[in-house]
Amino acid sequence: MLEGALVMSATLGLFVFILQMGTFLAQQQYYAERARAGARYAVTTSFSSSNTTPIKNYVCYGSTTAPSGATSGMFNLQPSMVTVTRRGTANTWNDRIEVSIAATSMVSHIPLLPGTLSGKTIVATAPTQSLGATF
């Protein structure tokens, strides 16, 4: 009876740990995919350093405009977490656009490791070789 309780609690703790790690990986992969999508969107439209709101909205909501009443996207992704920067020299071989997502947080339900964990900053960069090109 006691042995069964010990084995069951260890198995349950391991199961919760595996589920939580899977959620963490899925969330990090989601952020990375959204940063890549935002960088691709930025280099295929007419990029303006003075107005990055459409790109930030595209990263968060998949649309250049925020849905009415929406304050955050999936996994609590907010436009304030997204930074869009033009790197290199404009209209040269090293011209690129960088989209980064910072201040990500994940809620942990792992036994002995409860609370909110901070994620790393996700960065995606795309060259602007075809900036604003349409087909």
Image: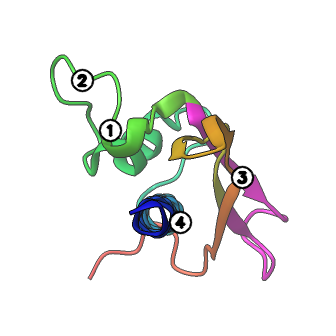
Q: Are marks 2 and 1 in contact (CB under 8 Å)?
A: yes
Q: Are marks 4 and 2 in contact (CB under 8 Å)?
A: no
Question: What whole-number distance in Å separates the C-alpha atoms at marks 4 and 3?
Answer: 9 Å
- Provide the residue designation for mark 2: 70
Upstream in sequence: badge 1 or badge 3? 1
Check disc 3 and give the amino acid type.
Thr
User: What x and y, as percent, mark residue 64?
Assistant: 29, 42
Question: What whole-number distance in Å separates the C-alpha atoms at marks 4 and 1?
Answer: 14 Å
Magenta-tinted stretch = 81-97
Check disc 1 and give the amino acid type.
Gly
- Provide the residue designation for mark 1: 73
Check disc 2 and give the amino acid type.
Ala
- Provide the residue designation for mark 4: 32
Note whether 126 is above or below 83 in the view shown. below
| Number of other residues with Cα within 10 Å of mark 4, as a class: few under 14, some 14 to 19, many 20 or more | some
User: What x and y, as percent, mark residue 78?
Assistant: 45, 32
Left-right relation of 127 to 23: right
Residue drawn 19% across the image and 16% down it: 69
- Provide the residue designation for mark 3: 121
Q: Which mark is residue 42?
A: none
Upstream in sequence: badge 3 or badge 2? 2
Q: Nearer the viewer, residue 89 or 10?
A: 10
Residue drawn 52% across the image and 33% down it: 51
Left-right relation of 70 to 78: left
Check disc 4 and give the amino acid type.
Ala
